């Protein structure tokens, strides 16, 4: 396994810990390995800052780490749940490999994750405003970025990781081969508007990344976030915190608003669990179809 996939915090002179982490990460591929390493690294750093050896941790320490994520870092419940899941799986691997007799995370209570997503996508008018601002932008990568995130529903690492060589045709459709979550590769059809946006960004290049930063190198998620915030400001779209996942969320909610069946939206978003798509739908429904509007309309004559 490549050394860059290993969390930096394990370089503490503990060969057993390095072996345990390497064996655990070897079970993953691609971006799943990178994200798992990142979440595991957060815990390892927390342990090192407290002079705690991760392989000697007890349940109480894991509970304290959980409270630290919630009360000090103030992370979203879904993020806390994911990091605890990564930690529990790591310790379970240690038990399987007989490095530990039992997992200290086994009886730690999982945080409650709300049924609705805390992220709200853009409204239809806000999304249109950003698309218009992108189309008129002097930076040809802007329109391609928003189109790939908001009209294809790509995750930011999928969009920024896509190469020109991945463009092609299949069964009469122009497609983009996307290397996605879980090391899965899928063919995503390109609507004409998205195809034109990508063509403008690619120009006459025949290889390399589709999306470039201002230094003509591959755009990363940080550059993508900065571009989106600048575009939102230019389009006079006010949001609490503009970030790439907001456009993927918009992709889902706009499809639902357009009348696309929930199952078809799940397939388009490549959600393994339909409950993930339903979380997006609940957040949309709770605002757009809230009973307050029905009551106000019923009482319109008196108000």
Image (cartoon, rainbow, N blue to C red):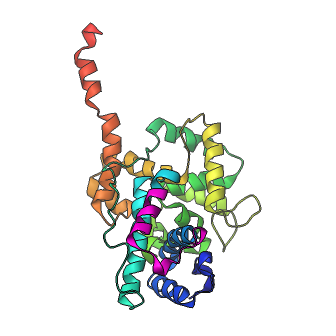
The quarter in which the N terminus is drawn is bottom right
Q: Residue furthest top?
A: 302
As drawn, 196 above or below 10: above
Residue 121's x, y, as percent? 45, 45
Residue 299's x, y, as percent? 24, 14
Question: Would residue 4 be found to the left or right of residue 258 on screen?
Answer: right
Q: Relative to the observer, which residue lies in front, 290 or 201?
A: 290
Mark yes or no: residue 251 visible.
yes
Determine which quarter of the picture holds residue 199. bottom right
As drawn, 182 above or below 220: below
The quarter in which the C terminus is drawn is top left
Please tell me whether residue 67 belongs to the stretch shown in magenta: yes
Please tell me whether residue 139 belongs to the stretch shown in magenta: no
Question: Would residue 16 be found to the left or right of residue 142 on screen?
Answer: left
Q: Relative to the observer, which residue lies in front, 73 or 226?
A: 73
Q: Residue furthest left?
A: 298
Q: Relative to the observer, which residue lies in front, 80 or 158?
A: 80
Give the dominant element type of the magenta stretch: helix, strand or loop: helix
Residue 122's x, y, as percent? 47, 42
Numbered label tally: 0
Determine which quarter of the picture holds residue 107. bottom left
Mark yes or no: residue 186 visible.
no
Residue at 35% in and 63% down:
271
Q: Residue furthest right?
A: 215
Q: Relative to the observer, which residue lies in front, 65 or 161?
A: 65
Determine which quarter of the picture holds residue 88. bottom left
Residue at 34% in and 35% down:
287
Where are the magenta residues, as a range? 48-68
Question: Would residue 294 be found to the left or right of residue 175 on screen?
Answer: left
């Amino acid at each position: 396994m490549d050394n860059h996939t290993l969390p930096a915090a394990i370089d503490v002179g503990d060969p057993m810990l390095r072996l345990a982490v390497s064996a655990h990460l070897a079970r993953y591929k691609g971006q799943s390995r990178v994200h798992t390493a990142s979440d595991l690294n957060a815990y390892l750093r927390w342990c090192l800052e407290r002079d705690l050896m991760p392989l000697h941790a007890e349940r109480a320490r894991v509970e304290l780490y959980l409270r630290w994520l919630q009360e000090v870092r103030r992370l979203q419940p879904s993020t806390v749940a994911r990091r605890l899941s990564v930690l529990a799986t790591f310790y379970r691997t240690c038990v399987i490999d007989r490095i530990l007799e039992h997992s200290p995370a086994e009886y730690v209570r999982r945080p409650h994750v709300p049924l609705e997503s805390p992220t709200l996508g853009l409204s239809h008018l806000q999304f249109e405003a950003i698309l218009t601002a992108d189309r008129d932008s002097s930076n040809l990568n802007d329109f391609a970025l928003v189109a790939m995130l908001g009209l294809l529903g790509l995750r930011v690492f999928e969009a920024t990781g896509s190469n020109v060589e991945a463009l092609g045709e299949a069964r009469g459709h122009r497609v983009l081969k996307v290397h996605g979550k879980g090391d899965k590769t899928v063919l995503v059809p390109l609507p004409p508007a998205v195809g034109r946006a990508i063509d403008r960004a690619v120009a006459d290049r025949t290889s390399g990344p589709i999306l470039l930063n201002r230094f003509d190198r591959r755009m990363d998620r940080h550059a993508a976030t900065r571009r989106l915030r600048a575009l939102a400001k230019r389009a006079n779209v006010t949001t609490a915190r503009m970030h790439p996942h907001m456009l993927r969320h918009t992709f889902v909610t706009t499809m639902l608003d357009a009348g696309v069946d929930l199952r078809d939206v799940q397939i388009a978003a490549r959600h393994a669990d339909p409950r993930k798509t339903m979380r997006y739908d609940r957040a949309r429904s709770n605002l757009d179809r809230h009973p307050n509007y029905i009551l106000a309309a019923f009482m319109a004559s008196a108000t």
